[in-house]
Structure formats: structure tokens, C-alpha cells
Image (cartoon, rainbow, N blue to C red):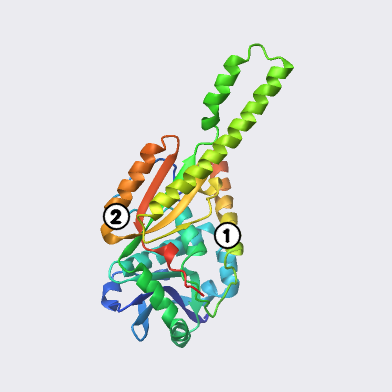
Amino acid sequence: MSDLGRYMYAISRALDAEHLVATRGLAGAPLEVVQHRELAAVVSTVDLGEYGEVALRRNLERLEWLEETARCHEEVVRAVAACAPVAPLRLATICLDDEAVQARLKEWYHALNQVLDRVEGRLEWSVKAIAPGEGSGKSAEAAVAAQVVAGSGAAYLERKKRQSEDKAAAEERALMAGEGMHAALAAVSAASRRLPPQDPRLSGHQGSMILNGAYLVEGDKEDQFQDMCQALDAIHPDLLVDVRGPWPPYSFAMMEQ
Amino acid sequence: MSVQGTTATRASVPQEIALVDLLDRLLGTGVVLAGDIVISLSGVDLVQVRLHALITSIRSDMVEPS
């Protein structure tokens, strides 16, 4: 029999544990709430044979396990978000017992309250913009090709030079477009962050991700935010604009340490 | 595995988060309260872990049909 630990999903405030009875934790375990003053950590018991340090290293490398754990973590966060402010914890935050959980709530009491103040009544939206890689250069390339009759060496070099200039200009335009979009979206958000562009091998996108933005949007400003997304999509017909949400405020639950 | 597509979509109702977006957030952001079990993989290491896991899976997905 392995030792047991407490897996922490999220921190909340003034949380009624009754709202969580319909949701299960990892391996089907019931969710429990560990309190310190008004702060509440949502936890469940896990087997350290699966969630201990050694096992975690191995399991995090297994996509199936990682996905299952991440999805369960997400479901719990959603259930909490439905009834109280929520600060999601990073995947695989595990304490040995409830005393250790409480010690963290006590230690980070003010920082956690600040985080909950920041995210309360707000949800996260994701906006990505993708500049199709090859497509944008094609019309310019075709134009040059049309001008160049039966390529001499000089014409070839000239064409190469133009292509390289076009590419640099396109990259510059994409960079500016990404910055402009982010600024416009940030202006209708309570907070915003730019996440690193995703690896195309993971996301499946083609071209370059010029914006992977996360936006914390006030509940009554969602229409305004979506209007802005639509307007940006309209003025950037050359970009793929991908809008997703609303999600719990994952990207805005960082503590200022 | 759900990998997010690149089609432009308009969301007005809560959507499921694509795994790649979820991992961006669960591994890259969120409150960091070091637990008693610390795999000390904050940041870079975790990104590599998940990249390794996902790429391995994507590769095997691509191999399977042939």
C-alpha cells in the first residue's frame, strides 16, 4: 500500500463545498475543502505511488496520463469557477497532508487574496493570430516572376533580392499587426498577457503565430471584447484570428512574489 | 487527443479547451504553491516534458495510418 497525499486543484474564497459534490477528483476521489480563514483549497486524496516525485516524473512523460490529469484538473477548476472566485493551481501541486495545505494558505494568505481580488467576476479569453507562412509572399513573388522574362543572372539575383525584402517586410508587418491587435484587445480587458507562440507541431497551425494572447475580461464587457475581436478580424483579412473562451482565469492567477 | 485547429471561430458559449491551450496554462501559468512533492519542473523543464510527450504522440499518430 502506497502512501497518500493531497492534490491541490485551486484556491477559492468563501466556497460552499456543497457545490462540488457532483464533481470528482483524480481517480474518482471525492473533492474536499481545506480552509484557512476565508481561503479554501480544493483538494482530493491521491496515491503517491502514482503522484509521488518519482512516479510523477515518469507519468508526466505519458501523454495519456498527462491529458487525463489535466482534464480532471480543468473540470474541478470549472466546477469551482461556477460558484466562487478561483485561482487555479499549477498541475501536480501535492502536499503530504492537510496541515501542509493549510500552512501554504497561511503563508500566502495576502498574495492569494490579491489574486482572487484580481480574477473575481472575470474570465479569460484567448486570441491567437496566425500569419499564413507561404501565402503572403506569393502574390509579390508572382508579380516579380511576371516581370522577369526568361531569367538572366542579373534578373535572377534581382528577383531573389526582392523576395528576401518582401519576406522581411511581411515579417515586420506581422510583428506590428500582432502588437497592434494585442494593444487593442488589452484596452478592452482588465488584464492581458502574451503567451509564447505555440509550437506548430502541437497546435497544428500553419504559418507563424504572431499573437498568442490571454485576456482577462470583465463579465459585463464580453460583448465589447468580442466586438473588438470581430473588428480586428475584419481589418486583418490576411490573418487567421482564433478566438476562444470564456475560460477560468488560468493565465491571471500568478502571484506577485 | 484534441489538437486545436486553425480555423477562425467565434465563440459565444463556453468551449472545451484544446489540450495544447490547457497545458500552456496548467504548466506555464497558474498559482505556483510549491507542494511537499516538488518535481522542480517549473517553467522550462515542464515545457520540454510536455513537448516530448506531445510530439511523441503526434509522431505515433502520423505513423499509424500508413
Residue at screen point 41% across, 45% down: A242
Asked if badges 1 and 2 are on one and the same chain, I answer no
Kindly tell me whether residue A29 is visible in this rendering: no
Percent of width and height locating residue A129: 45, 44
Judging by the rendered image, the residue that carries numbered circle 2 is A222
The reply to whether the C-beta atoms of the residues labelled 1 and 2 are less than 8 Å apart is no
Q: Looking at the image, is mark 1 or mark 2 nearer the viewer?
A: 2
Image location of residue A80, percent across then percent down:
33, 70
Vertical side of A23 occupied by A140: above or below = above
Q: Residues within 10 Å of mark 1 (few under 14, many from 20)?
A: some
Report the amino acid beneath label 2: Glu
Task: Report in which chain the residue with disc 2 lies.
Answer: A
Question: Is B18 in front, or is A24?
Answer: B18
Image x and y of residue B30, in percent = 46, 67
Q: Where does label 1 land, which residue?
A: B47
Percent of width and height locating residue B56 = 59, 51
Residue A241 sits in quarter: top left
Categorize mark 2 by other alpha carbons within 10 Å: few (<14), some (14-19), many (20+). Answer: some
